Amino acid sequence: MVKRIPVGAHYGLRDWLAQRVTAIVMAVYSVLMMLIVLIERPSNYGTWKALFSHQWFRLASLLFALSLFWHAWIGVRDILMDYVKSTAVRLALQILVILALVAYALWSVQILWSIQ
Amino acid sequence: MALPTRKFDAVVVGAGGAGLRAALQLSEAGLKVAVLSKVFPTRSHTVAAQGGIGASLGNMGEDSWLWHMYDTIKGSDYLGDQDAIEFLCRQAPQAVYELEHYGMPFDRNEDGTVYQRPFGGHSRNFGESPVQRSVCAADRTGHAMLHTLYQRNVRANTLFFVEWMALDLMMDETGQVHGVTAMEMETGEVWRFHARATLFATGGAGRIYSASTNAFINTGDGLGMAARAGIPLEDMEFWQFHPTGVAGAGVLITEGVRGEGGYLLNKDGERFMERYAPTMKDLASRDVVSRAMATEIKEGRGCGKDADHILLKLDHIGLEKIETKLPGIREIAKKFANVDPVKDPIPVVPTCHYQMGGIPTNYHGEVVVPRDGNNASVVPGFFAAGECACASVHGANRLGTNSLTDLLVFGKASADRLIQFLKENPGHKDLPKDAGDYSQSRLARLEGQTGGESVFEVGADMRRTMQAHCGVFRFPDMLDAGVKKIREVAERATRTEIKDKSRTFNTARIEALELDNLIEVARSTMVSAQARQESRGAHDRADYPKRDDVTWLKHTLWYKDSDRLEYKSVNLKPLTAESFEPKVRSY
Amino acid sequence: MKFRIYRYDPEKDTKPTMKEYDVALEPTDRMLLDALVRIKSMDDSLSLRRSCREGVCGSDAMNINGKNGLACITKLADLKEPVELRPLPGLPVIRDLIVDMSQFFKQYHSIKPYLQNAEPAPEKERLQSPTDRLELDGLYECILCACCSTSCPSFWWNPDKFVGPAGLLAAYRFIADSRDQATNDRLDDLEDPYRLFRCHSIMNCVDVCPKGLNPTRAIGKIKEIMIKRMV
């Protein structure tokens, strides 16, 4: 017996593309970070703090964090889609993940802009 | 106990090329049709056809249906019915265009038209020189065609009963057919399919021989059912041995290899076909090439340490052509012959390939039997198309590519005639009271059999007998002994026993039922061959090496009851063309 | 040669077992299917599907020593003993090596696997350049054996929603066909987190395809066209 299942949510490509774009952002940031560590060699709290006091670096870090959360959202949602078969439970878990990620994002802003 | 019954306008048995083409026609006409198939439709044996579909499109130079008709008649060694052959050749281009419109991925020419390759026995201007007439999809034409037809049926919402095996015809005392009984393989349940018209497209029975290019499912189920219902089988002595089956494995190597420039060599490295067929050489018709190969082997010029095969050389046509036009062949040669044809020749032997005979029909696909002095009295409600039918377009030897043409043209034509029959005969007639009883008694016999014969062993003995006694060359003493032997085997086949009595997907039971069908085909072949005292097309007798048009220009009809034989005349009168009188056949 | 074969008869067995066979093979038994036919001649209760025995019909797909393949073109000489045979994973088992393929075919049917062209058909063939025809190579050769889809974890988890590699290969076969006019509808139908985008390029499908086809590449091409359409 074959069950009838509604499909056709039309956000497949958007998310698939987003996952790739966010991956590129994270890769670029990681390379940048490595270069900084190699060239600037920040070795103590002071030098790290100086680095993070640049507005452009804060923005870059925020972009990285947001990319990470977005990327994670799609990845975690994919896992939930594969393994959690009950729609109610899946929806609940997805909302939890979204709330957590939004909280993380706000927290990231708070951390980044708390450095003076 | 009465069997459960379902009613349909029409039931089609078999979902290969002919069955699917017919089903499409019927579904698109809005009829309630059941298509029964032992296997999922795309697993039918049409899938294994390689070389192409013959049609005089004239895409590669001048061609005409009349030349195609001449080639087919000559190929048939004049045993083909010329009305049916004219119909086939005239309808062929349209059939190909339709298939193209359905989405068939044909190979193409630079100008966007469909590419055509040369093929055995196809010539321009009545035998002058080879012509390019075979449309193809690389060397997977049958696969592409079967999938395309299945896909079109998906579009038409055709109702398939997949993995249902038809068991017997339901015929009333007037001889009208009212459907079939069939078993659902998954559950073992038997149903009656009560239909106003029944179309058989059950394919061939190449599995009666040990060495065969045919699939396991080619067990002549339609022929067995027809024979048991008292319908004769026509021209069963004519079996095509394809020149190039992989030695030992039996897997087919398309004639397209020779069409694209490959040729055969004996152990001396001689291109021996030049001796046998100076004009067409390796592209002579299949019976001629197979016989030449068998002669070379018989006279000690075979290759290999046992001098038992011939080599098919194609390395000279180059890697690029092999990769684009014959990729499947390279795959098969590597897997089944352990050679890469880009470098080395493929060992081949003539291998049983195609059944020219079958259920007698006219060119509308109506089953016809002799009755009350009429040679071709129509069996009401019963149609057949494809390899199981004998229209007869292939006569004593089929031309390469004409099998697929046959499936398309007669698949459609028989469905069209069936639609007309339904219009003229509205409403279901009542089933005969005993409809289905025969199938039940056969099944009960099989269930209850004790101390019986093994299906596998009886089948193996049948195949060995056919192979040894009724092969490429036929000898009178071997045929006489063969008839005796095959009757013994047939007698044992009435006592087959299966150990597994379960109901769920019991393939042992299916194989036993298939053997019941095979054995009728084997018997009809041997008996018909023993009786025909001449050599014609694929039937070659050592004691009668010549064709005898005075006595034997006639079709054999074999009846199951006491192996009775009757004969009927060949139709030498085409629909519109001039008749092609039999003449000496040379290539 | 030694074999361990998955056996399950729903009428008798409450759960499947692995049955051992030790068979004396003949020199003519070269492929796994030859051995299975020989085993069946001794034990007629062993059930499997088979037909063409040359790798074009797609009947005898099974899991051979842990990897999906066709028995008829798997050489016995290449197999490690005991040869372990199981039904294709991820589909309901009907009996022994026979699985219920409805879900697989349902997905194939769901992509509308037929040419769609609303224009009246010409008198002769529709023209197609050899270059356009070349686009179909590597796509139309699929034999629907289900080796790919049943080796795909994404198909295992969502067989009812994910089209699977075989179906997507077929979808791209029609998207790639210069004669087909339904590309937009086809893309709309696949533009879904489940139907197409469950594919995570695991590439098991490519690894097992007995015809050497590459569904992952076809899936990539579909995504490429979707992006072209979007941006």
Image (cartoon, rainbow, N blue to C red):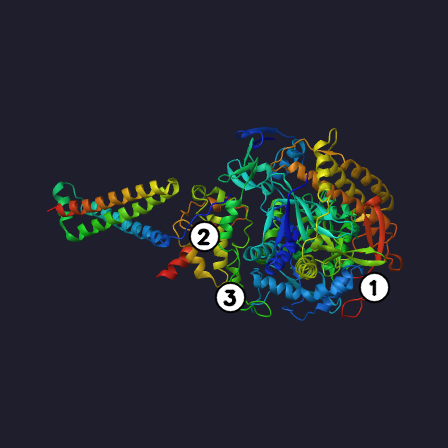
Q: Secondary structure at mark 1?
A: loop
Please tell me the numbered disc located at residue C118: 3
Q: Nearer the viewer, mark 2 or mark 1?
A: 1
At horizontal 38% and vertical 61% (from top left) the residue drawn is C228
Type of amino acid at the residue the image marks with label 3: Ala
Quarter residue B123 falls in: bottom right
- Read off the chain for label 3: C
**Is residue C92 found left or right of B170 in the rendered image?**
left
**Is residue B475 found left or right of A21 in the rendered image?**
right
Determine which residue is flagged by label 1. Answer: B582
Q: Position of residue B511 (x, y in %)?
A: 68, 39
In space, the residues marked 2 and 1 are separated at their CA atoms by 56 Å
- Read off the chain for label 1: B
* Dot 2 and dot 1 residues touching (CB under 8 Å): no
Please tell me the numbered disc located at residue A94: none
Which residue lies most toward the left here? A116
Determine which residue is flagged by label 2. Answer: C217
- Read off the chain for label 2: C
* Dot 1 and dot 3 residues touching (CB under 8 Å): no
Quarter residue B96 falls in: bottom right
Of residues A53 and A87, the one nearer the viewer is A87
In space, the residues marked 1 and 3 are separated at their CA atoms by 48 Å
Q: Nearer the viewer, mark 3 or mark 2?
A: 3
